[in-house]
Amino acid sequence: MVLLAAICGACSSGEGATGSGSGSSSSASGQPSSPASAVPSKGVMAAIDGRTTTVATKVDVGGSACGVALVGDTLWVTDNKAAELVRVDAAAGKVLGRYAVSASPCEVEAANGSIWVTTQSGVVDRVDPATGKVTASVTTGDASYETVGALGAVWVSNRNSHSVTRIDPRTNKGVTRTVGEVNAGGFVEEGGFLWVGDDTTGASAILRVDPRTWKSTPVPTGGNRPGYVAATPGRIWVSNVKSGTVAGIDATTLAPVGPPAAAGASPVNLKASTDGAWVWVPDDVGDLVTRIDTTSGKAVERLQVGAGPAVVAPAPDGVWVTHFDDGTVWHLVLV
C-alpha cells in the first residue's frame, strides 16, 4: 500500500501504510488484521450501568467518512476519498455543503475560530467555518495524524517523521520538532503536557512531551500498539490497538488506573464525552463502539454500528461516529 493513497491519519494504520478498512479482513488502514481466532471474543455487550445507547440519526455523506467534529449545531465531516469537508445540520441530519480541501483529509479540530483539517498531504488546512473555504495550508511533518488546539497554539502529530508541529494561529506558521522514535499517532493535551500515541505494532508506551522543553517521557500502557489517546481531567486513556484494550493512566503519577478494559478487536481513535464521564471507543475491525466508565475504567456497554467506524466526536447527549467503509456518520444517544 502506498502511503497517502487513501486514508485519514486518525484511522488505524499499521506499519507506515494507510488505506481503508473492511470488516474482519482488514483494519481501517488496509493492513491485514489479526485472524478472528487470535482475538478474544469482544462483541456486543448490553449496558451494565442502567443506561442504554441508541441510534438516533444516520447521515450519508458519501465516499469515505473519516474525521468528525461537532461545533454548535453544525457537524463537520471529512470525506477522505473525495478530499472534501462536509457541513451537516446536526439537528436535521442533512448535508448542507461540501468544500474542497487537501488530499487525504481525516481529523477535524475546532480552534481559534477556525476548522482545522488534518491531511496526509503534508499540510493542515485552516478553514473558515462561515464560508467553508481554506484560508491557509500549513506545512507539517510527514503523514500528519491528529490536530489539537491547546496552550495558545495548534499542535499536530506527524506519524512518519516522529514529530510534532506547533502552529501559531496568528501567523499560520508551523515549527516541527522530533519528539522520539515513535510513530506519532493519537494526540491530546492534558495538565500542560502533550500526550502522543505510538502507532507501532510491538510498542507498549506513549510519550508525555513537555511543550516548553520538548523533553519526552515514555509512559507504559500495558498493551500492544498504543496508537490513540484521549483525556479526561487528570487521566489519559489509550487504545492498545493490537491488544484490543483501553488503558487508563493517571496524568500526574503515570500509574495505571485499574486493569485495561476490553474494547473490541481493534480499538482506535477514542474520545471522551463532553462531561468526562465516558470514553467512546470505535473498533474499526469489529464494527463496534465501546463506552467506558472513566471513574472505574471498565467497559459498561458495547454496541454494533456501521462498517469501519473510524472517529468519534462527543455531543452533549452522546456521540457521533464516522464510518469509513460506508460513508455514513451516526448519532448515538445515551439515555
Image (spheres, helix red, strand yellow):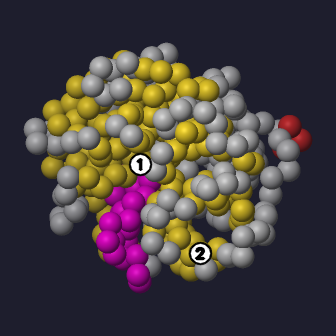
Q: CA distance from mark 1 to mark 2?
A: 24 Å
Find out whether residue 185 is within the magenta segment: no
In the shown orientation, is residue 235 left or right of residue 40?
left
Kindly report the secondary structure that dominates the magenta region of the rendered protein: strand
Q: Position of residue 23 (x, y in %)?
A: 71, 51
Q: Amino acid at mark 1?
A: Glu
Question: How many dots with numbers?
Answer: 2
Q: Position of residue 55 (x, y in %)?
A: 61, 76
Residue occupying the point 55% across, 62% down = 277
Q: Position of residue 206 (x, y in %)?
A: 54, 29
Which sits in the foreground, 67 or 217? Answer: 217
Residue sitting farthest toward the right: 37
Label ID, residue 191: none
Q: Eyeballing the image, is 126 above or below 274?
A: above
Whether residue 110 can be seen here? yes
Residue at mark 1: 107
Residue at mark 2: 334
Comes first in the chain, label 1 or label 2: 1
Tell me where the magenta segment starts and ends, as one range: 67-92
Whether residue 120 can be seen here? no
Task: Give the mark toward the camera: 1 or 2.
Answer: 2
Q: Eyeballing the image, is 5 above or below 130?
A: above
Which sits in the foreground, 164 or 75? Answer: 164
Which sits in the foreground, 242 or 326? Answer: 242
Q: Amino acid at mark 2?
A: Leu
Residue occupying the point 41% across, 83% down = 92
Q: Position of residue 9 (x, y in %)?
A: 47, 39
Number of residues whose C-alpha sits closer than 10 Å to that of mark 2, classed few (under 14), some (14–19) or many (20 or more): some
In the shown orientation, is residue 256 left or right of residue 264?
left
Quarter of the image with the N terminus is top right
Residue 84 found in image quarter: bottom left
